[in-house]
Structure formats: C-alpha cells, structure tokens
Image: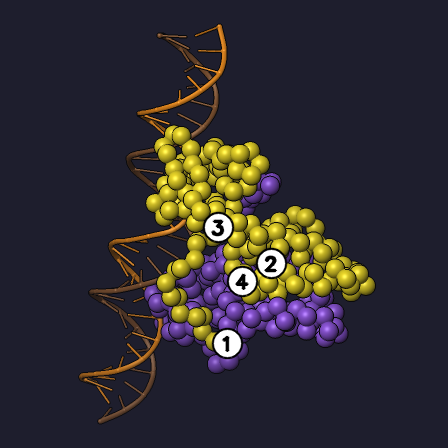
Chain colours: A purple, B yellow, C brown, D orange
Amino acid sequence: MPPVPAKSSPRSASTAVEDYLERILGLINTKGYARVVDIAGSLRISQASVTNMIQRLDAEGLLKYEKYRGLVLTTAGETLAKNITRRHELLTDFLKLLGLDAEVIYHDVEGMEHHISPSTLRAIESLTAQLQRQPALLARVREQVT
Amino acid sequence: MPPVPAKSSPRSASTAVEDYLERILGLINTKGYARVVDIAGSLRISQASVTNMIQRLDAEGLLKYEKYRGLVLTTAGETLAKNITRRHELLTDFLKLLGLDAEVIYHDVEGMEHHISPSTLRAIESLTAQLQRQPALLARVREQVT
DNA sequence: CAACACACTTAGCCCAGGCTAATATTGCCT
DNA sequence: AGGCAATATTAGCCTGGGCTAAGTGTGTTG
C-alpha cells in the first residue's frame, strides 16, 4: 500500500464550491435566476451560509454579486458549473444503466462527482455507450442489484 | 433538479475515519502492527494529528489504544476497515479494466471509495466480472483513455 | 545505568464551512 | 407614503480535522 500522494497545491475547487456552482447553474436554467433563498433551499443549508459562500465565490471570480440584488456566473464560474454538471449527468447515466435505484444513484453521484478525473470520466462515458449495445450483459448485472 | 436530501443522523463513518482505518489495517497486514509514526507517514500528516484521531477512534470503540504502547483494532473497527478496503479494491479493479493510468486510478478511488453504497458496489463488481469476457468492448473503451 | 534519539503526547492554534440571532433592505399592498 | 413580510446580511459561534512547538516516555547503546 503506497502512501497517500503528497498534497500539492489545492488547484481544483473544493467540493463545496462545486456543489454551490452546480446548484446555481441548475436554478438559473430552471428559473432564470438564483436567489440566496433558493440556493439555500436547494442545498438545505441556511441562507446565512449561502451569503457567505457567495461572497467567497465573488472574490474568487466565479460569479459577480451585488449585495441584496443578485448574482450572475462569470464565464469561469459557468465553465466550472457546466463541467461538474456534466460529470453528474454522465455518472447518473452510467449508474442508471446498471439498474440502480434512483435514490442510491443520487446519493452516490453526489459523493463521487467531485473526485472523478477527466480520463476516468471519458472511460465511463465510452463504457456507457458500449454497454447500451449489450442488453444480455446488462441483464446479468441488473440481477445482482437489489 | 431535486434538492439535496435532508441530512439525517450521520450514521456512517466520516471519510477521515475510513481513511485512518484503511491505513491501519494495511499497516497491520504488511508489518504486523501500526505505530503512530507509520500511520502519519502513510497518510502524510503529522504525528500529532494521528494521536488525536486515534484517541477519538478509541473513544468510539473502533480500536483499543494504550498510551505510548500501541493499538489494536476492535472487531467493529476491523469490520469497517475491511469494508472500506474491499471498496477500494473493487473500484481499483474496475478502473484498471478500463485501462486507466495507475496514478489516476489511485486518486479517483481514494476520493470515491467513501461515497459508494453497497448496491452500487455490487453492481460494479458484477459488471467487472462480465466485462472480463468482453475484450473487444474493452478495447474500444481503452481507445478513449489517454 | 546514563544519555540520547526517537516515538509519542499535549497545548494551543488555524481554516473551512456549517449554524443562530440580530439587523438591514426590498418590495408589495393598503 | 407607511408598514409588513420576505429576503439578505452581519456578527459571533461551533465542529472536524489539520498544524507547530514544546514536553514526556522508552529503549538502545556505550
């Protein structure tokens, strides 16, 4: 068992940041805007926490925020948000194909999406496509899930 | 996009707890014992942090610890450790099959192993077995990975 | 058996990211 | 316009899990 790799510079967004951006993009796509109260409700955390984080995201240039007035994603923020959303969808599609329960899928994807690297994502995307043509194989896999 | 599910009682071990137990079991299996200094080296954190966490794990009944003298896993702790180790191995096998690079596998598994539920694990285990018999399909997937 | 190196522990700190309570702003409605 | 409900913000706190520095045990070795 090799040691955990040295923790270099934290270049990628924290999982919390990704969760916020994903939700914000989701809200913008479905309602046209993302208010603090909606983000809070969607993430099931307090409005105060949301305000806090939003100010951080503004400082980091991931969104532009005007106090009491609202926010928009910057291109950097939108890129990140789309990226995490894509990971979410790909993983969801993959697990769906395996016949897993929706609740389980949601839980697992929510946890895993922050940790998957681009090449793994590509592999799973390709695998998902290939599996689509293998109903017999899939049937055997699905037998194994509750 | 549904809201994040309500955060009920935190029944399962934190990812940090799982990481510690996994390492401790690994050390016991390879050296016969797990000293503070080894755990710290393996996780690349300070000895002080390890001592701290070990005291917590003792309080939670996952291991038995005697100051300055050493520790052993309880059955509860060993069960948990074996469980997380199994998740780690299964995920690793799966990603290996897809032709991913060892570094990438290590990173992704380390992140994902804490979030995968039993049924997803079973599905992936079964899928891995099925894929073993599909060299052509695997070849097509591997083409996609860097 | 003294002394030294190494292993371990304690104390006190930091940061992320939650929370509540109190306060401020907005906007709608009379 | 004034007032109220909803929304947003601030202040201050907490917990998990890191860290360093300083102090304590332990065991090997001359």
- Relative to residue B90, is residue A146 depicted above or below? below
Which chain is mark 3 on? B
Seen from the viewer's position, the closer of residues A77 and B2 is B2
Q: Amino acid at mark 4?
A: Pro
Circle nearer the viewer, 3 or 2: 3
Local secondary structure at mark 4: helix
Which chain is mark 4 on? B
User: B131 left or right of B24?
Assistant: right
Label 1 neighbourhood size at 10 Å, few (<14), some (14-19), many (20+)? few
Q: Amino acid at mark 1?
A: Met
Seen from the viewer's position, the closer of residues A119 and C30 is A119
The residue at 49%/64% (across/down) is A19
* Residue extending furthest toward the front: B75
Mark drawn on residue B28: none
User: A105 left or right of D23?
Assistant: right
Q: Amino acid at mark 3?
A: Thr
x then y, percent, for residue D7: 35, 76
Q: Amino acid at mark 2?
A: Ile
Circle nearer the viewer, 3 or 1: 3
Q: Are marks 3 and 2 on the same chain?
A: no
Seen from the viewer's position, the closer of residues B46 and A99 is A99
Q: Label 3, on which residue?
A: B79
Mark drawn on residue A116: 2
Q: Label 4, on which residue?
A: B118
Let me know if residue B63 appears in the view.
yes
Q: Label 1, on which residue?
A: B1
Q: Are marks 3 and 4 on the same chain?
A: yes
Task: Name the image quarter holding residue A131.
Answer: bottom right
